Amino acid sequence: MLSGSPPLSGSESDGETMKNLSDQIEAMSIAYTIVDKDFSVKELSPQASDLFRVARDQNLFQSDIKFVDENFSYFDLLGHLKQAISVGLECHFELGISYPDRNVEWVRLSLIAYKGAYLIQLVDISELVAARRLNKQLSMQDPHTGLFYREAFLAKINEEHDHGLVCCVRICNYQRINEIWGTAVANLVFMEILARVSNEIEGAVCSKHSTDSFNIFIPKDFQLDVESFYSLLNEPFHFNGRHFFSNVALGYYVEEKGDNHEQSLNKAEMAILDVLSERVRLAEFQEDLAKQIEHQNNLETEFRAAVSKTDLQDDFFVVFQPIHDSETEKIAGAECLIRWTLNGNFISPMEFIPIAEKIGDIGVLTQFNITS
């Protein structure tokens, strides 16, 4: 990028001064070259000669090397240097020098005006670029499975695909395998299921969802029989003489043109929740499911608020269901039942009792029932 520092002032090029500067820089083993405004080389170090593949009195850009940025896209170094010279500013760039016969060399290049000429200094940043690349990769991909993380997954399919089939795969017995045979075997099972996906579907893009599940995007042009694919994922396999059943659940959503990929991914993940709750293992997302999940979430939020109040009688009350003795045909007792009203509407115990059990508040209701 261009910096705001003004160029060093000076008169006509002083050959002796330039030679002294060259000797000082070379003594520090810094790659450098001094060029005129047309990029004809006046002085250069052995390191710079090797990097640019030029000699003195040649044009700096006459060799067959190319320049790239960290994404390996073309970098117009000559254009950037000309612009810097035209506006009279120093400039500093990080770039790769690409060769037809060897690896890319990564350098930080600085251009400084000096005595009517221009000093180009190059500092090796290969280790810095490697570290940045590793950090970027770790932020995008799970180091254990190689799967994309969610944001990188969405970025890739947004860039490359219009619509397709989005799946969420869960290995339902992963935790059980982990408890019996250990993490290493459980991870082998995970990778075996993942390998079946890669072998079966060309162009599939996968991402990590959780320890026991992952997402798949299948391009629209790939013809997939979902039921056959589901059966394939559930075929048994062997590790070290042991026989394993994977017990895979598959939720999926078929995108239409113009669908938002992130919303589609949410729908596939909602479908996997549905297959687990209904104890089936293959389900396509349905819009009614989204409404049901939203209703359940809202109900749980309201229930948590109700049971956190000091006085539960604001929202709950008790009714008695008579118990009849079939022989005497008389009332022998009564069953004590709790009821909940939300905004004046009765909520079925079939809805709120499972919520109370799930979040651990069933004891609060029981105590209220006894004391009322």
Image: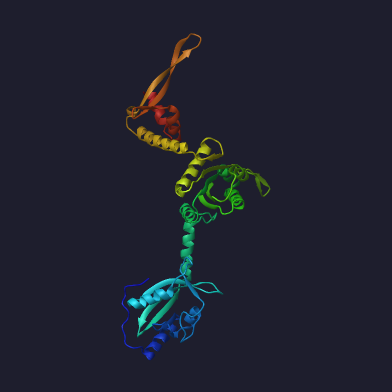
- Give the residue at x 47% y 13%: 324
Q: Quadrant of the N terminus?
A: bottom left
- Give the residue at x 52% y 49%: 164
Q: How many marks?
A: 0
Q: How is the image coloured?
A: rainbow
- Give the residue at x 49% y 74%: 66
338 relative position to 144: left or right: left
Q: In the figure, 24 relative to 202: above or below? A: below
Front-most of residues 209 and 152: 152
Front-most of residues 59 and 234: 59
Residue lying farthest to the front in this orientation:
257
Q: How far across and down, in percent of the image, does residue 195 sit? A: 60, 52
Q: Quadrant of the C terminus?
A: top left
Residue lying farthest to the bottom in this orientation:
16
Residue lying farthest to the top in this orientation:
328
Residue lying farthest to the right in this orientation:
241
Task: Please say whether residue 306 is visible from this viewpoint.
Answer: yes
- Quarter holding residue 249: top right
Q: In the figure, 50 relative to 328: above or below? A: below
Q: How far across and down, in percent of the image, does residue 13 sit? A: 36, 88
Task: Please say whether residue 211 is visible from this viewpoint.
Answer: no
- Give the residue at x 40% y 88%: 19
